[in-house]
Image: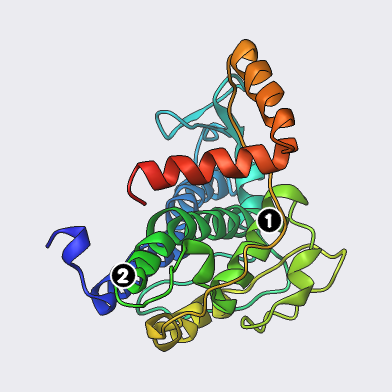
Amino acid sequence: MAEHDATIDEVIGELERALLISLVVTLTSHNVLIQKVEEWERPHQRFLQGLEPTDVGHYLDVKTLTWADTSGPGRVHMQDLVSAINGGAEIWMAGAGRETVNSYPEAQAVAYAQWFSHAFSLWEEQFRGRIAAWFDKRTPERIRGSDIRSDYFGDIRLIRNDFVHNKGICKDSAQLKRLEYGLTRRRPIEITPEQMLSLIDLFPRDELRSAPTPLPPGDTVRVPGKVNPHVLEDVQTHAQKLGLNDSQLLEAALSEWLARNGS
């Protein structure tokens, strides 16, 4: 079905499906690391027990996923991998249950940080505007992407921002509204597998189906872009004769452009 023909339920369903797929990938992405560590530990333990004449290489070549005896570009020491998954060997595996542990694995932190960035991108760049466009065609008032608000996705944004801009230390994410994660300001963000899974039940289907209320425009913003300096000078000179300052000139010019182009 063409994107513009989709119903609001179909758009929301696409968003939910995209989030679920990304959650599955995130919660199982550590399995390859776990398998490689187990493959390495078996012959290594046999060597330590005197059952093998030589030890297996202590480095993993990331490109080939094979063992190497020496360090080098693209190679990771196995002890670093062991530490990265320490305590997280059973984050979530189908049919095997889940387990919360005291040691917070680095691999888990990396995977979850990537998920929150991806989820925010899905919402902000792909679906928020589509939901706004659907309501805009069916309400007398203009509905913009910024009018589509959700505490659920607002919380995802706050966690994503702290992962990206604050090195994974809780700052703004201490004030979550929908996700009950109990994050503490100035402490590392350590989200559990159970908390990740709670995102499934908390998905705001009904909230996103509700017609939004348009927001006031808020504070003025700077306009991006560049212009020929001679054109700018001539326009500003003429605007001064009309008694317009730069902000009034810019708003008048943009409004006129919209009017001329049928918006």
Which residue shows up at 73% across the image and 73% down it? 102
Decide which of 115, 24 is in the foreground and name it.
115
Residue 53: mark in rendering = none
Badge 1 amino acid = Asn
Residue 134: mark in rendering = 2
Badge 2 amino acid = Trp
**Circles 1 and 2 in contact, beta carbons < 8 Å:** no
Q: Which residue lies furthest to the right in this view?
A: 186
In the rendered image of this protein, does residue 11 appear above or below residue 213? above
The residue carrying pointer 2 sits among few (fewer than 14), some (14 to 19) or many (20 or more) residues within 10 Å by Cα, namely: some
Horizontal relation, residue 40 to residue 231: left or right: left
Q: Which residue lies furthest to the left in this view?
A: 1
Which residue shows up at 66% across the image and 54% down it? 106
- Residue 171 visible, this angle: yes
Decide which of 211, 127 is in the foreground and name it.
211
* Number of the front mark, 1 or 2: 2
**Residue on which the image places disc 1:** 161
Spot occupied by residue 18 in the image (x, y as percentages of width and height) = 34, 64
Q: Rounded to the nearest whole Å, what is the CA distance between mark 1 and mark 2?
A: 28 Å
Residue 233 lies in quadrant: top right
Spot occupied by residue 200 in the image (x, y as percentages of width and height) = 44, 80
Spot occupied by residue 188 in the image (x, y as percentages of width and height) = 79, 62
